[in-house]
Amino acid sequence: MAQIEVRHLTKIFTSKDAKVDALKDISLEIEQGDIYGIIGMSGAGKSTLVRCLNYLEKPTKGEVLVDGKELGAMSEKELLKQRKDIAMIFQHFNLLMQKNVVDNVSFPLLIQGVKKKEARRKAKELLGIVGLEEKEQSYPAQLSGGQKQRVAIARALASDPRILLCDEATSALDPQTTASILDLLKDINQRFGITIVIITHQMSVIRKICSRVAIMAQGEIKEHGLVEEIFSHPKTREARELILKDSDGEHGDTAGRTQDRLMEAKKIRIVFSENSSFEPVIANMVLKTGRPVNILRADTKNVGGIAKGEMILGLPDDEKLQKEIEDYITERGLEIEEVTGDV
Amino acid sequence: MFSSEVIQMLVRGIGETLYMTLASTLFGYLFGLPMGILLTISDKEGIKPNWALYKVLDVIANIVRSVPFLILLIVLIPFTRMIVGKSYGSTATIVPLVAAAVPYIARMVESSLREVDAGVIEAARSMGASTFTIVTKVLLVEARTSLIVGVTITLGTILGYSAMAGTVGGGGLGDIAIRYGYHRYEADIMAVTVVLLILLVQIFQTIGMKLSVHLDKRK
Ligand SMILES: Nc1ncnc2c1ncn2[C@@H]1O[C@H](COP(=O)(O)OP(=O)(O)OP(=O)(O)O)[C@@H](O)[C@H]1O
Ligand SMILES: [Mg+2]
């Protein structure tokens, strides 16, 4: 039995002048211990769906079962108790701004009636897990975005949840911080076996940590399955668009770029030293991987059959491919180092 | 400059004004705070929407607030008599002052609590917090600096009202200003009472602002 089961979920928002079908007959199963991604463009209904998973939003029709128990059949009191098992983190962290870090993390425990001293002890332990023990007396306003999200994660873990819902948890963070938060989530998933549901509009997030993904558009799930499968054989237009958008980069100035224009997510410097034998390394590599790279700068000389100098390459935004390329180059005895900024 | 009787009278005036202002604000919050909380949570965007309750409180607040204070004071005379036993003097003035303050405070509280980030409330709900917990542990805590600013403003307003009530026999500095300045043309005494009133407002304001800045952890 799946840990989370969504059956024919429909959510209609009715206001004075409009009726929005935010969710249209969604069915979904999420297994215990999985990291499940839900991706879609803005307005697709992702937040609405995830808020139905802990009944912060009451569905118009359909059922949500968590560990076989139907949330819709629960009394208000049972529901409040059930939410202890389903923690949530948010795009804007949603910390108590007037409470310091340790009190923020203790908060869910105090709600459950844990003694203050015991709550603080546990909070400090959790701050250790997220790597923020030295910030326990700070206030959220004194922390960076990444640190705030770590506090939020510690807070989410306080009630020993079995499920962690993340609604755009990394969307307000820069790529590096995003990566570190995703690593932390993965670590938590493996260490505690917590099922994680990740809502995002960034394919890179899905690719980095999810095992399964559902693609949402216009309140429907267009496609779902294993991440690799969807990446290699996207069946729907929505999936293809999201994958394309991803390789086009989360780099801001996408306007004016054509889609087949190469985006370099990573730049590396290759140093050709005395002992590297002369062969058309780059050309061979392109032939082998089947993906072009950008030569951003080259300063090499052919000295008696030996290439000397350096070259800077822009690699495509695909970690697997990047690794492949880098491995290929290092296998040929060349040194590489990553460079950042303009070259 | 002034005779010792006048000085004594001014000191007593300050005491009465402070007594009326502080007591009215205290009782005002006793009723106004819960009313403001109920207005906030029963609103359709609130955490426990209840259209009927909201509408009733909303209408009461609007009616009471639109009645000029002097009229309220007169209309409430029988009621005041019933509670205090008489309808003049500082203690009796507290009754209409509270009546005027409650809806005012409720609106003030409502606007402070509305400033609390919806995301934080959502986070608390996701942890299984009950409505009561959200009010006491999230709304009142997160809005505390704004609430204190509200108290400060309320004190100033009530002080002004108490001076107005003084003119119809309520005691305090307002009473003195009218009796000496208006009826006896002793402009210097009136000037002093006005300066004293301004000073009191200043003091409330300074203390309140200092406190709220001190308690604000958002920066
Ligand atoms: N409380 C509400 N009242 C009315 N309409 C709503 C409400 N919440 C969401 N909607 C509508 O439901 C649809 C789905 O919204 P939702 O927030 O779930 O999208 P999303 O996929 O999370 O988008 P984003 O990536 O921008 O967060 C949107 O059209 C939105 O306008
Ligand atoms: Mg959303």
Image (cartoon, coloured by chain):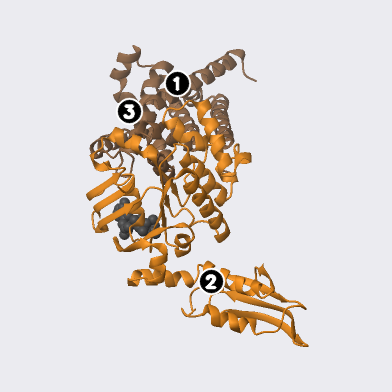
Chain colours: A orange, B brown
Q: Quadrant of the C terminus of chain A?
A: bottom right
Alpha-carbon span between mark 2 and mark 1: 74 Å
Dot 2: element: helix
Q: Which residue is mark 2?
A: A321
Q: CA distance from mark 3 to mark 2?
A: 79 Å
Foreground mark, 2 or 1?
2
Which residue reaches farthest top?
Answer: B85
Say which of A152 and A210 sits in front. Answer: A210
Q: How many marks?
A: 3
Type of amino acid under label 1: Ala
- The amino acid pointed to by label 3 is Leu
Give x and y (percent) for residue B99. Answer: 35, 26
Up-down: is A173 above or below A94? below
* Image quadrant in which you'd find residue A294: bottom right
Front residue (pair B217, A123): A123
Do circles 1 and 3 both sit on a common chain? yes
Q: Does A119 sit above or below residue A134?
A: above
Name the chain letter of the residue that bears numbered label 1: B
Residue, disc 3:
B72
